[in-house]
Amino acid sequence: MKNHAFRVFFALILFAFSHSSFAQNNRASESNAIGWYGLFMTYKIDDKWSIHGEVQLRRTEWIASPQQNLYRTGINYKIHPQVTFRAGYAFADTYNYGSEPIQSNGIRFPEHRAYQMLLINNPIGRVALSHRLMLEQRWVGRSLDPNATQFDEWVYSNRMRYMLRADLPLKGPTLDDKEPYLAVYDEILIGFGKNVNQNVFDQNQFAAVVGVRFSGKYRLEAGYFSQILQFGRLVGGKNYFQYNRGLIVSNFVNF
């Protein structure tokens, strides 16, 4: 069973890197060094209900310049001991960064999201395997005026996301207080609907981290992070990709 758990864990790593190498075949691209720093909070109301909140500060040049700020909240309902449903709202504030701006006029733009999420835990031996499925309804600020300095319309689109994550405790068969663990995850984001342009494949996000569970109320993890992002517009007549790589640091707090 121990060897089987390790096979599952490292199969996920190979799966994630295969996504990355496939996307890199596109020649119109840029690379950025990034750092994503997050605080994720859960307030438990009872055995079924809890409240989720998070703040993510996403930076380029590791930490020097802003890439995006993301704020997300939601209500959790535990359908089953291994299945949780969440519905909520998110706000994203995206900056002009990199050598080619996401919007052609290079404006900073906001985004409102409503979302529905299903989290399924599926432990296999020592590996805590989880699946996260999410639907997002997005209202993105945009301007088609090449000389605009701010957005002047909202564009609606849909996006679906799937994340596969594996956690492996480094001491014993289970993760207990004051113990370290390894975790890897890969998430693919797909746009759909009439207002989706070039970026039906929207993003792929991969992370490999080392974490410590200090207690049932707090754990910290940090490690390598990769983001492949496709623009919704063509640049020079070509599909345009960002290959962003760097550091991710996440804090998880339970109240």
Image (cartoon, rainbow, N blue to C red):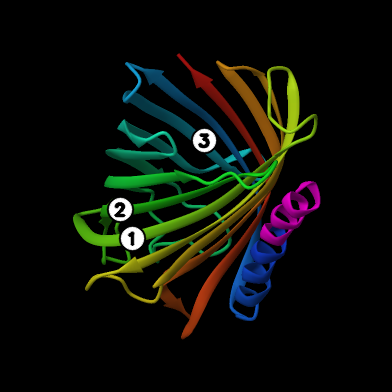
Write down the residue under mark 2: 136
Q: Secondary structure at mark 1?
A: strand
Q: Quadrant of residue 200?
A: bottom left
Q: Quadrant of residue 231?
A: bottom left
Q: Earlier in the sequence, mark 1 or mark 2?
A: 2
10 in magenta: yes
What secondary structure characterizes most of the magenta part? helix
82 in magenta: no
Where residue 206 appears, as percent x and y from the top left, is: 62, 54
Q: Label 2, label 3: how many angstroms apart (C-alpha)?
A: 20 Å
Segment tinted magenta in the rendering = 1-12
Write down the residue under mark 1: 159
Q: Which residue occupies the extreme front position in the image?
A: 1
Q: Secondary structure at mark 2?
A: strand
Where residue 32 appears, as percent x and y from the top left, is: 65, 56
The answer to whether the residue labelled 2 contacts the one labelled 3, judged by CB atoms less than 8 Å apart, is no
Where residue 227 appears, as percent x and y from the top left, is: 59, 57
From what the image shows, is residue 192 above or below residue 189? Answer: below
